[in-house]
Amino acid sequence: MIKVEAIHFTYPTGVEAIRGVTIQIEDGEFVTIMGENGAGKTTLVKHFNGLLKPTHGHVEVDGIDTRNASVAELSRKVGLVFQNSDHQLFSETAEEEIAFGLRNFGFDAQTISKRVEWALNLLDLVEYRKSSPFMLSGGERKRLALASVLAWDPQIIVLDEPTIGQDYQQKEKLREFITQLIAQKRTVIVVTHDVEFVAECRPRVILMSRGEVVADGPATRILTDYETVTKVSLLPPQVTQIFLRLSDLNLPSNIIDIYEARRLLSARILKAGLR
Amino acid sequence: MSVIKVSDLTYTYLGSEKPTLKEISLVIEKGEFVVLTGPSGCGKTTFCRCFNGLIPHFYGGDLKGNVIVSGLMVHDHSTSELSQHVGFVFQNPENQLFALSVEKDVAFGLENLGLQRDEIRSRVEWALEMTGIEHLRENAPYELSGGQQQRVAIASVLAMQPEVIVLDEPTSFLDPLAAKKIFEVVSRLNTQLKITIILVEHRLDLAVRYANRVIIMDNGQIVLSGHPREVFNLEKARLIGVGIPKAIRLFQLLREDGIELTHVPVTPDETAQLIREVLKP
Amino acid sequence: MRVFEGLKFKRASTPIHRLDPRVKFLISCIIFITAVLFNELLPLLVLFLAQLPLILVARVHREWIQSLKGASIFAVMIFVMNLVVGYMSPTSSYTISFSLAMAVRFLVLIASFSSFFLTTSPDDLGLALEESRIPYEFCFAFTTAVRFVPVLANEAQTIVDAQRSRGLELEKGNFMRRVRNYIPILIPLIVSAIRRSLELAEAMESRSFGAKKTRTSLYSLRMKSIDYFVAILTFALFFFAVYVRMVVAIPRIEIFIP
C-alpha cells in the first residue's frame, strides 16, 4: 500500500512541483494519474520508489517511510518503467538487459536465468534473447524495458506514459497486459494523458494540475466531468462527448465505454420502436 | 493540379535486404488535407520522408520509381531546394528547435536562404501571427510547453512559404487539448492559405475531422485511400488494425444492431446529432 | 559544480547587460591581460575589487560569488603550491604575499569571465561570434550546444533515475566498481546524443541549412555611443596600467614568517 501524506516537493531550482498531495493506493488497485504536461505526475510517482523525497510530509510504501529507505530497497517493491525505454537500455543482449536488475537486487545465478526466461516469454521476446537492444524496433524496446522491470517481480508497477507513439494494436496488447498484471494481484499505476486508453480500462483516475490533486475517483465519474477534465488540458472520451450532447434526452451522462454506449442506445432506440 | 505525384515508388534502406516501400503510386492534389496512418512499421514515416528529399539524399538507400513534388523530381533536387516547397514538422518538438529564441528559430530557414532582413522580418511576423505565438517571440525553447514548441516548429516551416507541409506524428508528446490546438492551427493553414497538408497520425479521433482524405498503409503499401467517412467504415480498415475513430465505430456498432444513422459521422457532435434525429424524428 | 552557476546567463535589464557583447568581451580580455602584467599583490587586489561596481550594477552578485566559491578550492591549491615551491627553494622570491597574489590573479580571471557570461545572453554571444567573421558552422555549433546543455543535463538525470530504479547503486563499492557503475549511465546518454544529433540534422536539412554560402541574419549587433565610450575607457585604463607597470614602483605588501 502506498500512503502519501500532505507532501510538498520543491526542486533544487526552486520550482514547487508538488503542493500538498494526500492520497492512498491500496494493494491490487488499478490507478491512472492524469493531467496536463507539467502537472507533477511524474514528480509524484518518483516519490513512490524514493527517487525523490518530499520536502514536507512523508510517503509510506508498505509501512516504510521512503525517507528512511534507499531507492534500491524501494525499487524492489515498486517497479518504475520510464517513458523513454532508450534511457534504460545499454546491454549487449536482451537477456543481459533483463538480468541487470536481477543482479542488482542480489538474486542468485539460477534464479536469474529462470526469471530471464520467464520475462522473455511473458513479453513475447524469446526470439530476440541474443539480439542487441539497439537493433529492436521501438515497440520491442518498450517491451524489453517492461520485461526488465517485471523480472524482479515487484508488487507495485508504475508505467510512465506507456502509450506514447504506440499504434492501436500495441495499445490493445498493453491493455490486455495490464489486465493480466491486475489478475496477478499486483498494484498497477499508469501515468498517462491518453483518455481513450483509460476509458477502455476503467481504472480509478487521479487528476492532477499544477502540483495538486484536483479530482480522485472512478473513471466513469471523473472523465465525464467536462469542466474538470478540460481544466487539466484533457478532453473527455469521444463517447462521453457524444452523450454530453444528448444529456437532455434522458440518457445517462457517465458513459465512457463504447460498448456500453451501444447497448444503451440500441435498447432505447429499439424499445421506442424507432429504427 | 497535382502537387505530389508518386509513381511505382520502391525504397530499400541502406543495408536492408527487403524494401520498406513497395511500388507505391499516389497523386495528391493541391489543397488536400491528407491523414496518413497505419500500424507501426507500415512505412508511413519512411514514405513521408520521400517528399522533401530526406529520402534519398539524407538516408541514402535505393529509391526506384519517381517522386515529383511541386513539379520537381526529388531525385534531381537537394533537400535544401525541396524544403522551400515541402516543409517538415517532426515528432519531437525539442529536437527541431535550434535557436535560443522563438524569433530566431522561425527566422532560421529564411536566414539559410539568404533573404534580405526586411523580408525575413515580415515573414517571421506573419508566421508568428498565423500560428498564434506572437507573444512568445522572445522566449527560449526550454521556457515553452510541448504544444508551444510544436507551434514554433510549424511557424518556422511556414515562414519558408511551402506549398506542402508534412507533419510526422506531431502530437505524440502532447496532451489532448494541446494536440487539438495543433490540429486547429494546421487546419487553418489548409483552409486559409490552401497549403496541402500531409499529417501522419495515430490519434485519429481528433485528426480525421479536418481531413478530406485518409490513406492507410500496411506493410509498405497503400491499402486504402479515400474520404474518412468511407475508408474507416470498411471492414478492411478495422482488420488492418488502425484505431477506427469512435464516432465511426459507434455508427458501425449501431448498424450491427439494425440501427442505421443517415450518414457516417466523423465527430462526436455529428454522431450526437444523428442519434438525436433517430430518437426524436 | 557550483562554479558553473556563475557561467550561466542571468536575464536582467541593466546597463551592463545592454552593453554590446563585444565590448564586454573586450573588458574581460583586458582584465585578463592586465592581471598577467602584474605579479604584485596590491595591483591584483585593485583589479579584483574594481570589478565589484560592475557586478553590483549588473545585479549578478549572488551568482558571481557562487562561481568564486566554486573556484576558491583551486585558488587555495595555487596558494599552497606556490608556498611549497617557495619554501623548498629559499633563493627564489616566493613569499606568502606572492603566493597570495597568484591566488588572487586566478580569482580575477575567473571573476572577469564569470561576469561576462552572466551578463551576456548566449543569443548575443552567438551573434557576436557570427559578426566576428567566424565561419557560421562554428557559431551554430556553439549556440546549439548552449541550447542543449539544459536538455542534456535533464536527460542525464533521467537516465540516472531510470537505472537507480533498477537497483543500480552508484554510491556503493570500491573505485573500480563505481567506475563500472557508470556504464549503464554513459551508454544510454551516448546513444541518446547520437539519436538526437540525427534528428537535429534532419530538421536542419529540412530548413535548407547550407543552402547559400552567404547567410543573412534577422538581427545584427550595433555599437551604440555608450559602447564606444566604454571601449575607449577600457583601453585608456589599460594604457594606464601599462604605464604603472613600466614606470611606477609598486609598494610591496610583504608578509614575513619569522
Image: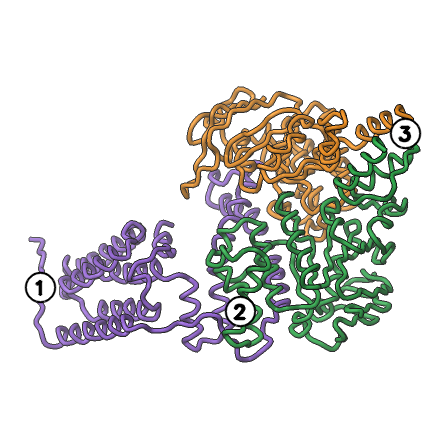
Q: Position of residue B278 (x, y in %)?
A: 85, 34
Q: What element carries label 2?
A: helix
Q: Chain A is drawn in which colour?
A: orange
Q: Distance between the residues labelled 1 and 2?
A: 62 Å
- Total labels: the figure holds 3
Report whether A143 appears left or right of B138: right
Please give the letter of the chain rendered in purple: C
Q: In the drawing, does residue A138 fall left or right of residue B113?
A: right
Residue type, label 1 = Arg
Q: In this view, does B169 lie to the left or right of C92?
A: right
Q: Nearer the viewer, residue A4 or C249?
A: A4
Q: Residue at x 65, y 59 (%)?
A: B89
The disc at residue C252 is 1
Task: Name the residue tied to disc 2.
Answer: B122
Residue named by callout 3: A274
Callout 3 secondary element: loop
Dot 1: element: loop
Name the subunit of mark 2.
B
Q: Quadrant of the N terminus of chain A?
A: top right
**CA distance separating discs 1 and 3:** 107 Å
Q: Which of marks 3 and 2 is in front?
A: 3
Q: Are marks 1 and 2 on the same chain?
A: no
User: In this orientation, which residue lies closer to the viewer: A154 or B34?
Assistant: B34
At 56% across and 73% down in the image, what residue appears?
A: B112
